[in-house]
Amino acid sequence: MEIKIKAIHFDASQQLESFIMKKVSKLEQYYDGILTAEVALKVVKPETVENKEAQIKLLIASNEIFASKISNTFEESIDESVEALTKQLLKYKEKMRQK
């Protein structure tokens, strides 16, 4: 799986990037047909407490699975997005089995 990280209007630290790689690569244990994962990070305006948004789009064969979460930190947003994607992947996998 190829993981692309895009930080919009700021530079993501190496620590944040390695955290994202570690978390997103764990999604492969739920479904091994993931081709690419595109992660977009941005700070939502206006400056509020919860203003760190993480969007993750997974490309699977001919489908896309998407999750977007806003939290206090990028790490928290990534965690929540990965949780949401895990549920979606399990549902998708179950649906594929039934066909």
Image: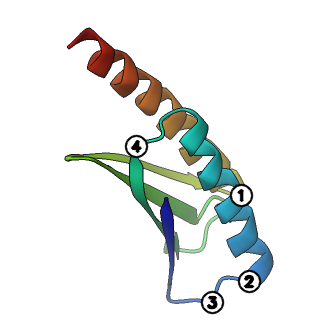
Tell me if residue 46 comes above or below residue 85 in the rendering: below
Which label sits on residue 11? 3
Q: Nearer the viewer, mark 2 or mark 4?
A: 4
Query: Which one is earlier in the sequence, the residue at label 4 or at label 1?
Result: 1
Query: Which one is earlier in the sequence, the residue at label 4 or at label 3?
Result: 3
Residue farthest to the top? 98
Say which residue appears at 34% left-offset and 26% top-offset. 92
Query: Which one is earlier in the sequence, the residue at label 2 or at label 4?
Result: 2
- In this orientation, which residue lies closer to the viewer: 72 or 58? 58
Q: CA distance from mark 2 to mark 4?
A: 29 Å
Q: Which residue is mark 2?
A: 13
Q: CA distance from mark 1 to mark 3?
A: 19 Å
Amino acid on which disc 1 is placed: Lys
The image quarter in which residue 70 lies: bottom right
- In this orientation, which residue lies closer to the viewer: 23 or 98? 98
Q: Which residue is mark 4?
A: 33
Tell me if residue 97 comes above or below residue 30 in the rendering: above
Q: CA distance from mark 4 to mark 3?
A: 30 Å
